[in-house]
Amino acid sequence: MGRGKTEIQRLVWLLSVPAFAQVNNTMKTLTDVQYESSEQHKEMGKARQKQDLKGTYKLLDALK
């Protein structure tokens, strides 16, 4: 037997995701715990997004 997952195992996992998401949401509601995360990566900041957008416009202009 290999160490990877079979196609059936992947399918079962994929089909179980919505059910486990509902269980997770229900437990957060029941325990009044909410998970929040802050910006972990500088690439996700507003300044970086603005710079990326400028770069995109420059590329589009060059392709015209």
Image (tube, helix red, strand yellow):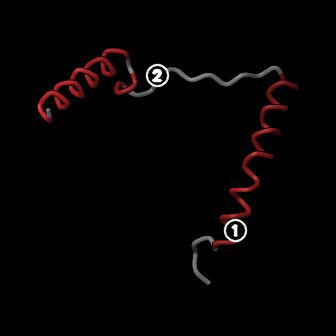
Circle 1 is placed at which residue position?
Answer: 9
Q: Residue at x 56, y 23 (%)?
A: 37
Q: Is residue 24 left or right of residue 44?
A: right
Out of 6 and 27, give the one closest to the viewer.
6
Spatial CA distance of label 1 from label 2 is 34 Å
Residue 2 quadrant: bottom right
Q: Where residue 47 sits: x, y (%)?
A: 31, 15
Q: Is residue 58 left or right of residue 37?
A: left
Which quarter of the figure is the C terminus placed in?
top left
Precedes in sequence: disc 1 or disc 2: 1
Residue 27 quadrant: top right
Q: Secondary structure at mark 1?
A: helix
Q: Residue at x 79, y 32 (%)?
A: 25
Residue 33 quadrant: top right
Res 30 label:
none
Relative to 34, does residue 2 appear above or below in the rendering? below
Q: Amino acid at mark 2?
A: Glu
Q: Residue at x 22, y 24 (%)?
A: 57
Relative to 38, does residue 26 appear above or below in the rendering? below
Q: Secondary structure at mark 2?
A: loop
Q: Where residue 38 sits: x, y (%)?
A: 51, 20
Residue ranking furthest to the left? 62
Q: Where residue 55 sits: x, y (%)?
A: 21, 26
Q: Which one is closest to the eye, mark 1 or mark 2?
A: 1
Circle 2 is placed at which residue position?
Answer: 39
Relative to 13, does residue 1 appear above or below in the rendering? below
Which quarter of the figure is the N terminus placed in?
bottom right
Q: Is residue 30 left or right of residue 48?
A: right
Q: Amino acid at mark 1?
A: Gln
Q: Where residue 32 sits: x, y (%)?
A: 82, 20
